[in-house]
Image (cartoon, rainbow, N blue to C red):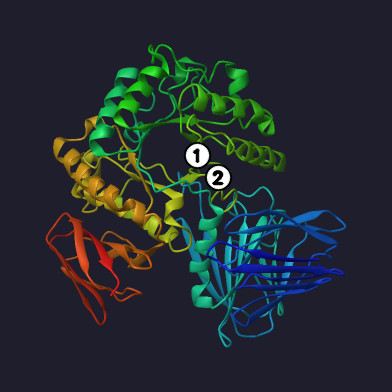
């Protein structure tokens, strides 16, 4: 059988299968499988692999404008392959056996990238190590680049599983095992992606693939959530929320999300937990069958009062929800019904999923089934219900498992606990955006004036930063206004309003562009930034730390034409030179937001 498939503005794809032999040409990737032998090839760069078992049959189960989905039938079951006409990657779902690639050269350099979640306990979220291959090597992580540098030939292996220390299915010898002549990616029943090409391009190409796998619906957004001021649920009342909506409207915030406390039930994080049997963070249905009902004492007008006000101001509403992890998520179908009610009855358009603990394979299977079901829920206007998945604690899906499902709520940081530093929040986004699309994440902006005394004379304390610096530093993500906005000073409110207005005027264009970190790793002292790179131009944010050097030259991968300064908190100037973009910022902790057009 043969298939010739065409795609809008992105070429065609050929798929042939006969007598157990599969041949695929996507335009940028060629795949051939014969029995248990196969290869991937792109731009003349070929990597051979051992197929887990012979293919008995294939069928196309899905086709869109940017991908084809194949089902491969084996003697032991089936496997799904997803192919993209413009990307040199093969994506697979789970197969019980490992896929093994041949190492035909002794000149292999291995780059291992491990990402870390449970950010309540960790503040270094990306670990990268480089190894010259020799005889045998075992590594844990999610991204592995094999660089055959003598032939400029790269193979990128991505394991689409939870972070290594959170995955319930693990191999005893790590995620990747290199022997003298083989590379074995231990799938452990999770999905994977395999890509070939120039080694220097593979991480950026994977970032494109990840973007395609995500379910993006529109431009980046700005969300507020009051939990960052540590009132927890004590302030959660109708009058309080109505004031927050007024503040959100003035600032230009898109979504006001009500965290833990809108509901009748009491969680273990509640201010009132001690008076209510300690509250719970799982076993909600046993604790209180009405746990997820709207609290009528806090919201006497029901959610209708909130929704009416929000509608008048053009603001959307989000709600916090914790699926019940008890008994391996046995109640996941009940949780689906609750989430549907939150959308249909209470008008929620964004749901924060928190409190998840994936202890077993059954737990993980049921939770993924829940996610796959709720992704089909539509709001009253037909728009999809959207989700932000909290990865701050316990065993959760992390960065690579369940890629399509919403944005990631990356970290809780509080000035009350003296663990919020603007440069460290920027550093985490900067490091993650090297490998994954920044639009996948939410990163926080706190009220930097709170708890100033706790930091003493620390030069990197939040109180020393302009609030618009804090916003600009996470602008590449979906900025999270992690505070009670009604308690901002007038000066900070105005500064935040101005930078948000500029951002909103450009974010639609920015949301279509990949983001790359530039400059040095943010440490609060040196110079760092982000680069949005489009076809005809782009955007740049540049940040000066507490260094006394007023001038710095940033290396950019493109030559630019005209530069326009969109916003800054200090005197700023830029000039393109042969060495890069020469930047002057008039004060420490200064920044500039720029737009450029290609020559």
> Is residue 314 found left or right of 576 in the rendered image?
right
On screen, residue 291 above or below 86:
above
Under tag 2, what secondary structure?
loop
Name the one closer to the observer, 66 or 149.
66
Residue that label 2 marks:
405
Mark 2 or mark 1, which has the lower sequence index?
1
Image location (x, y in percent) of residue 245? 30, 28
Could you say where residue 218 lies in the image, as x and y percent from the top left?
A: 43, 47
On the image, which quarter does residue 198 sit in?
A: bottom right
The residue that appears at 33% across and 52% down in the rendered structure is: 507
The numbered disc on residue 387 is: 1
Task: Tell me the quarter of the image containing the N terminus.
Answer: bottom right
Spatial CA distance of label 2 from label 1 is: 7 Å
Looking at the rendered structure, the secondary structure element under dot 1 is strand
Q: How many dots with numbers?
A: 2
**Is there any visible trace of residue 236 in the rendered image?**
no
Q: Is residue 226 above or below residue 18?
A: above
* Quarter residue 316 falls in: top left
Q: Residues within 10 Å of mark 1 (few under 14, many from 20)?
A: many
Vertical comparison of 568 with 247: above or below: below
Could one spot residue 277 in this view of the protein? yes
Q: From what the image shows, is residue 401 above or below residue 324?
A: below
Where is residue 544, by image quadrant? bottom left
> Which residue is rendered at x = 51% and y = 25% of the image?
344
**Residue 529 locus on image (x, y percent):** 30, 63
x and y percent of residue 45 in the render?
A: 62, 81
Location of the C terminus by quadrant is bottom left
Relative horizontal placement of residue 183, taking residue 58 as reference (left or right):
left
| Residue situated furthest bottom in the rendering | 150
User: Which numbered dot is residue 87?
Assistant: none
Q: Are marks 2 and 1 in contact (CB under 8 Å)?
A: yes
């Amino acid at each position: 059988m043969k298939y010739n498939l065409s795609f809008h503005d992105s070429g065609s794809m050929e798929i042939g299968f006969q007598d157990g032999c599969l041949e695929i040409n996507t335009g940028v990737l060629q795949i051939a499988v014969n029995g248990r032998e196969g290869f991937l090839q792109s731009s003349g760069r070929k990597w051979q692999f051992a197929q887990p078992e012979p293919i008995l049959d294939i069928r196309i189960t899905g086709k869109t404008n940017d991908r084809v989905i194949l089902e491969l039938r084996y003697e032991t079951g089936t496997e799904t392959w997803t192919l993209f006409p413009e990307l040199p990657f093969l994506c697979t779902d789970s197969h019980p056996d490992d896929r093994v690639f041949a190492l035909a050269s002794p000149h292999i350099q291995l780059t291992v990238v491990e990402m870390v979640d449970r950010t309540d306990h960790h503040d270094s979220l990306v670990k990268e190590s480089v190894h010259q291959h020799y005889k045998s090597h075992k590594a844990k992580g999610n991204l592995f680049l094999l660089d055959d540098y003598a032939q400029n030939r790269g193979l990128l292996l991505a394991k689409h599983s939870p972070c290594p220390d959170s995955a319930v299915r693990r191999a005893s010898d790590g995620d990747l095992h290199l022997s003298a002549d083989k590379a074995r990616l231990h799938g452990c029943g999770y999905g994977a992606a395999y890509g070939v090409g120039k080694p220097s391009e593979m991480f950026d190409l994977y970032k494109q693939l990840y973007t395609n796998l995500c379910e993006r619906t529109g431009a980046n957004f700005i969300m507020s959530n009051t939990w960052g001021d540590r009132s927890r649920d004590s302030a959660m009342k109708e009058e309080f929320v109505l004031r927050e909506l007024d503040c959100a409207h003035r600032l230009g915030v898109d979504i006001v999300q009500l965290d833990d406390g809108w509901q009748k039930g009491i969680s273990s994080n509640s201010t009132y937990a001690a008076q209510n049997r300690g509250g719970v963070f799982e076993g909600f249905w046993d604790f209180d069958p009405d746990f997820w009902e709207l609290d009528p004492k806090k919201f006497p007008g029901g959610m209708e009062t909130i929704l009416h006000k929000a509608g008048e101001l053009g603001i959307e509403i989000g709600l916090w929800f914790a699926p019940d992890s008890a008994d391996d998520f046995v109640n996941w179908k009940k949780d689906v019904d609750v989430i549907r009610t939150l959308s249909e009855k209470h008008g929620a358009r964004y749901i924060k999923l928190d409190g998840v603990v994936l202890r077993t394979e059954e737990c993980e299977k049921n939770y993924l089934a829940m996610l796959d079901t709720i992704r089909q829920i539509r709001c009253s206007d037909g728009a999809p219900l959207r989700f932000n998945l909290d990865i701050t604690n316990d065993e959760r899906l992390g960065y690579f498992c369940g890629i399509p499902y919403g944005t990631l709520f990356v970290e809780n940081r509080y000035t009350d606990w003296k663990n919020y530093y603007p440069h460290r929040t920027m550093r985490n986004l900067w490091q993650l955006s090297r490998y994954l699309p920044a639009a996948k994440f939410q990163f926080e902006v706190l009220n930097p004036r709170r708890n100033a005394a706790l930091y003493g004379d620390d030069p990197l304390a939040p109180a020393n930063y302009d609030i618009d610096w804090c916003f600009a530093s996470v602008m590449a993500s979906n900025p999270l206004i992690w505070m009670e906005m009604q308690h901002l000073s007038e000066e900070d409110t105005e500064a935040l309003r101005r930078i948000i207005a500029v951002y909103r005027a450009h974010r639609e264009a920015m949301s279509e562009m990949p983001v790359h970190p530039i400059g040095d790793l943010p440490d609060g002292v040196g110079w760092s930034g982000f680069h949005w790179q489009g076809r005809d131009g782009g955007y740049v944010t540049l940040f000066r730390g507490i260094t006394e050097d007023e001038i710095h030259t940033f290396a950019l991968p493109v030559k630019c034409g005209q530069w326009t300064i969109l916003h800054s908190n200090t005197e700023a100037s830029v000039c393109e030179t042969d060495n890069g973009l020469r930047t002057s910022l008039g004060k420490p902790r200064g920044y500039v937001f720029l737009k450029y057009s290609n020559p």
